[in-house]
C-alpha cells in the first residue's frame, strides 16, 4: 500500500510542472475550488516562472503517459476545467519519443516466446507512430502482405498503475471535502478512467473491439475497420492489416487526390451517429491521427483502445434532448432530465426548462452554419451546478467524441451544419424506436419479459427501482483511508507528512528556480 507521503510527493511534483506551464491559475481562480486545494496550488507555484498564457496540454505531456490520458478525459469537462482549458486539452497529442527498437524486439519475442523472424519477414525499426501506451511499426509477413504491429511500451502497465493509485488517493480526499467537489464525483471519474486505461493496456481487448466494430459497421458503405491477424496478437502485441491512405487532417493531400471534402465531412458525422445512436457502440478516440481516407474515399479507422457504449434507454433520452433543444421544446427536454434523474426531484421542472431556454434560444437565433454541438454542450454544462446535477461518467466518452467529430467535420467543411446532418438521422431513428411499430414491438417484448420474470413479487420490486439515467452500475471504488479519518492522531501524521513534503519540495524548488 503506497503511503500518504508518497502520494503527496507525487502531487507536489506534478503541481510544480503544472505551475511552470501556468496550468494552476485556473484552479486557484475558480470560486468552487476548496480552500485547501487553493493553498496547495499557491505552494506548488511558489518561485516558479509562470507564463502569461497557460499551456495545459504541455503540462500534461510533461508529467507523463497517464497524465496525457487524464488530460484527454478532462478535455470533455468544460464544466470542471473551464472552456479555455478544455479547448487547449482537445489538442493534446498522444505522442512521446519512441522506444528503441531492441527493446521493442524483446517485447515481441517475449510475448510470443518465438524469434521475431518466425513471426514477420521484416519489421521496420523506425515506428510510424509512438503514443503514450504503445508504438506502431510497419512490417511484412512471409506471404508478402503488409501489416501494422502495435507493441506496448515496456513497463507501461506498472507506470499507469502507480500514477492512477495517486489519482484515486487525491480524488478520495477531494471528494471528502464535499460541496462542489462531491457533486463532480472525482472518485467515480477516476474509477472509470482506470477501467478505460486497463482496456487500452490489453491489446487483445483492442483487437476484440476492432472486430466488434467491424460487425457493427459491416452494412455501412465506404467505412472500413482493418482485419486483425489473431495469430500474431496477444496482450502486449497487436497485428492488423496495413492501411494505405491519407490522414483526414491532411487537407492538401485529400484535395490532390480528388476527394469531395464536403461529402467526407457528412459521411464522417453519419458514421459516428450510426455507431453511437443506432448501435450504442462507438469509436471513442476519433481524433485526426486515427482516421484515414483511402483512394476510393473509404474512411478507414484505427486504434480501438477506447470504445464507448450507451444503452438503448439512454440513447432515446439523448435523442429526445437533442431534438428538443433544436426545435425549442424545452419543457420536454426538462422532463427527460427529471425522468432520467439527471436533475434531483426537489428542483422545479419549469425552472429547469427556463434555464434550458437560456441555452437554446441564442443558438436558434444564429445562422445555421454557426450552430455547434460543442457550444450546446458547453451551455448545458454551465447550468448543471445550479441544479445540483451530478456527473454522469457513462456519458463522458460520448460528449468527448461528439466534440471530436464536430471538430473534424468542420475542418473538412467549415460550412457544415451538424444539426442539418444529424437531425434527419436522429429523427428517423427515434421514429423507428418510438413510433407505432416501435411501441408495439416494445409492448410485445415487455410482455414476454414480464412472463419470464417470475415470481411476480420480483417484478413488483424491480418496478420500484428507478432507472438512473440509464447509467450502468458504478464500479466498486477502492477503499482509501483518509488522512483525517481517525481524528487527532492521523491529523498529526498528516501535518508531519505535509511538513516533510513541503520542506523537501521547497529545497528542490530553490535549486530549480535558479536553473
Image (cartoon, grey):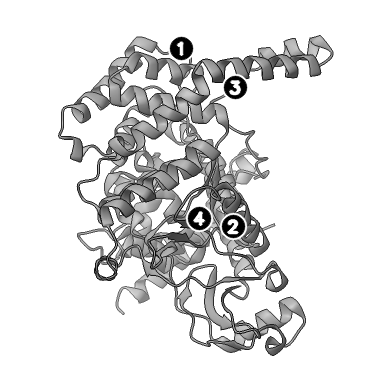
Q: Which residue is mark 1?
A: 346
Q: Earlier in the sequence, mark 3 or mark 4?
A: 3
- Image coordinates for residue 41, horizontal then vertical, percent: 37, 52
Q: Earlier in the sequence, mark 2 or mark 3?
A: 2
Dot 2 crowding, Cα within 10 Å, few <14, some 14–19, many 20+: many
- Image coordinates for residue 463, horizontal then vertical, percent: 68, 13
Report the side of 277 relative to 382 (left or right): right
SS of the residue under disc 4: helix
SS of the residue under disc 3: loop
On screen, residue 485 above or below 115: above
Residue 210, labelled with which disc? 2
Which mark lies nearer to you, 1 or 4?
1
On screen, residue 3 above or below 65: above
- Image coordinates for residue 286, horizontal then vertical, percent: 43, 55
Q: Quadrant of residue 352?
A: top left
Q: Earlier in the sequence, mark 2 or mark 4?
A: 2
Q: Earlier in the sequence, mark 2 or mark 1?
A: 2
Residue 498, labelled with which disc? 4
- Image coordinates for residue 378, horizontal then vertical, percent: 31, 37
On screen, residue 86 above or below 424: below
How far apart are labels 2 and 1 at the CA level?
Answer: 44 Å
- Of 182 and 206, nearer the camera is 206
- Of 468 and 269, nearer the camera is 269
Q: Which residue is mark 3?
A: 467
Q: Earlier in the sequence, mark 1 or mark 4?
A: 1
Quarter of the picture holding the N terminus: bottom right
- Of 484 and 160, nearer the camera is 160
Amino acid at each position: 500500500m503506497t503511503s500518504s507521503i508518497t502520494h503527496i510527493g507525487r502531487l507536489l511534483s506534478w503541481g510544480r510542472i503544472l505551475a511552470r506551464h501556468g496550468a494552476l491559475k485556473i484552479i486557484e481562480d475558480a470560486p468552487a475550488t476548496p480552500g485547501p486545494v487553493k493553498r496547495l496550488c499557491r505552494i506548488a507555484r511558489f518561485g516558479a516562472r509562470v507564463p502569461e498564457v497557460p499551456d495545459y496540454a504541455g503540462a500534461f505531456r510533461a508529467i507523463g503517459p497517464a497524465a496525457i490520458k487524464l488530460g484527454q478525459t478532462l478535455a470533455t469537462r468544460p464544466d470542471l476545467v473551464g472552456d479555455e482549458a478544455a479547448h487547449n486539452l482537445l489538442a493534446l497529442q498522444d505522442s512521446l519519443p519512441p522506444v528503441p527498437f531492441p527493446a521493442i524486439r524483446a517485447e515481441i519475442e517475449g510475448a510470443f516466446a518465438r524469434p521475431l523472424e518466425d513471426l514477420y519477414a521484416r519489421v521496420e525499426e523506425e515506428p510510424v507512430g509512438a503514443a503514450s501506451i504503445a508504438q506502431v511499426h510497419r512490417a511484412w509477413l512471409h506471404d508478402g502482405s503488409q501489416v501494422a504491429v502495435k507493441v506496448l511500451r515496456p513497463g507501461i502497465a506498472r507506470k499507469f498503475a502507480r500514477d492512477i493509485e495517486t489519482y484515486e488517493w487525491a480524488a478520495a480526499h477531494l471528494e471528502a471535502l464535499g460541496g462542489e467537489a462531491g457533486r463532480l464525483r472525482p472518485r467515480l471519474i477516476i474509477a472509470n478512467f482506470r477501467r478505460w486505461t486497463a482496456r487500452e493496456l490489453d491489446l487483445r481487448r483492442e483487437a476484440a473491439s476492432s472486430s466488434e466494430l467491424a460487425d457493427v459497421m459491416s452494412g455501412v458503405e465506404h467505412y472500413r475497420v482493418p482485419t486483425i491477424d489473431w495469430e500474431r496478437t496477444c496482450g502486449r502485441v497487436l497485428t492488423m492489416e496495413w492501411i494505405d491512405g491519407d490522414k483526414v487532417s491532411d487537407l492538401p493531400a485529400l484535395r490532390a487526390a480528388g476527394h469531395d471534402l464536403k461529402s467526407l465531412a457528412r459521411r464522417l458525422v453519419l458514421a459516428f451517429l450510426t455507431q453511437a445512436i443506432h448501435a450504442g457502440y462507438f469509436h471513442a478516440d476519433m481524433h485526426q491521427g486515427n482516421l484515414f481516407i483511402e483512394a476510393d474515399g473509404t474512411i478507414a479507422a484505427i486504434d480501438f483502445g477506447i470504445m464507448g457504449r450507451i444503452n438503448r434507454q439512454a440513447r432515446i433520452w439523448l435523442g429526445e434532448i437533442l431534438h428538443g433543444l433544436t426545435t425549442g421544446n424545452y419543457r420536454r427536454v426538462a422532463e427527460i432530465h427529471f425522468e432520467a434523474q439527471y436533475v434531483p426531484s426537489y428542483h422545479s421542472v419549469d425552472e429547469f426548462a427556463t434555464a434550458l431556454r437560456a441555452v437554446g434560444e441564442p443558438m436558434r437565433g444564429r445562422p445555421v452554419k454557426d450552430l455547434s454541438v460543442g457550444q450546446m454542450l458547453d451551455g448545458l454544462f454551465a447550468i448543471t451546478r445550479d441544479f445540483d446535477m451530478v456527473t454522469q461518467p457513462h456519458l463522458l466518452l460520448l460528449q468527448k467524441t461528439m466534440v471530436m467529430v464536430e471538430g473534424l467535420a468542420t475542418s473538412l467543411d467549415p460550412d457544415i451544419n451538424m444539426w442539418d446532418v444529424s437531425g434527419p438521422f436522429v429523427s428517423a431513428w427515434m421514429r423507428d424506436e418510438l413510433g407505432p411499430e416501435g411501441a408495439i414491438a416494445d409492448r410485445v417484448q415487455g410482455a414476454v419479459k414480464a412472463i419470464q420474470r417470475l415470481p411476480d413479487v420480483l417484478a413488483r420490486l424491480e418496478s420500484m427501482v428507478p432507472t438512473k439515467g440509464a447509467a450502468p452500475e458504478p464500479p466498486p471504488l477502492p477503499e482509501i483511508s483518509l488522512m483525517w479519518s481517525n481524528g487527532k492522531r492521523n491529523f498529526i501524521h498528516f501535518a508531519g507528512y505535509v511538513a516533510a513534503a513541503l520542506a523537501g519540495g521547497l529545497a528542490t524548488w530553490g535549486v530549480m528556480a535558479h536553473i
